[in-house]
Image (spheres, rainbow, N blue to C red):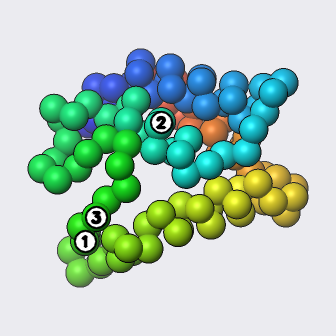
Amino acid sequence: MICAIHAPLCCSVANMVVGEVLGETATLLTVADLRRYNKEILDPNMVEEGVIPGMIRTHEVGVGRYSGAPAQDCEYLLLRMCKWLSTPRARRNGEGPDHVLTSFHKRERRAA
């Protein structure tokens, strides 16, 4: 539901992300970038208690019997993901940030 409510904002941020990652002055995706995008998309009044837009969680989460990654590992895992998305292998296999972001952007535009 949040995506449907925030679709225009998500598309705006997605456009910005695609421009930054694919533009003429393209840069590598960083954890700081992800935190900034998260802060721009999430409305602080519409998130669960304990969620701070733009911040990496410091508490444990789960769905049903499944636990999320330990909170202390989240920043490291995001760093690893950013590095992996920037590898030639990820880009060659259509898994680089350009593919991921344009796919997300297309999906969000259809939802809007």
Amino acid at pointer 1: Glu
Q: Secondary structure at mark 2?
A: helix
- Apparent side of residue 49 relative to residue 34 in the rendered image (left or right): left
Q: Position of residue 76 (x, y in %)?
A: 52, 69
- Apparent side of residue 36 relative to residue 83 in the rendered image (left or right): left
From the viewer's perspective, is the residue at label 3 or at label 1 nearer?
A: 3
* Residue found at x 43% / y 67%: 74
Q: Earlier in the sequence, mark 2 or mark 1?
A: 2
Q: Position of residue 9 (x, y in %)?
A: 41, 21
Q: Position of residue 22 (x, y in %)?
A: 77, 32
Write down the quadrant of residue 14 in the picture.
top right
Classify 10 Å Cα crowding around label 3: few (below 14), some (14-19), many (20 and above): few
* Residue found at x 53% / y 46%: 32
| The label number, if any, that marks residue 60 in the structure image | 1
Residue 63 versus residue 32: which sits nearer the camera? Answer: 32
From the viewer's perspective, is the residue at label 2 or at label 3 nearer?
A: 3
Q: Are marks 3 and 1 in contact (CB under 8 Å)?
A: no
Amino acid at pointer 2: Tyr
Name the residue that disc number 2 marks. 37
Q: Is residue 47 above or below residue 87?
A: above
Name the residue that disc number 3 marks. 58
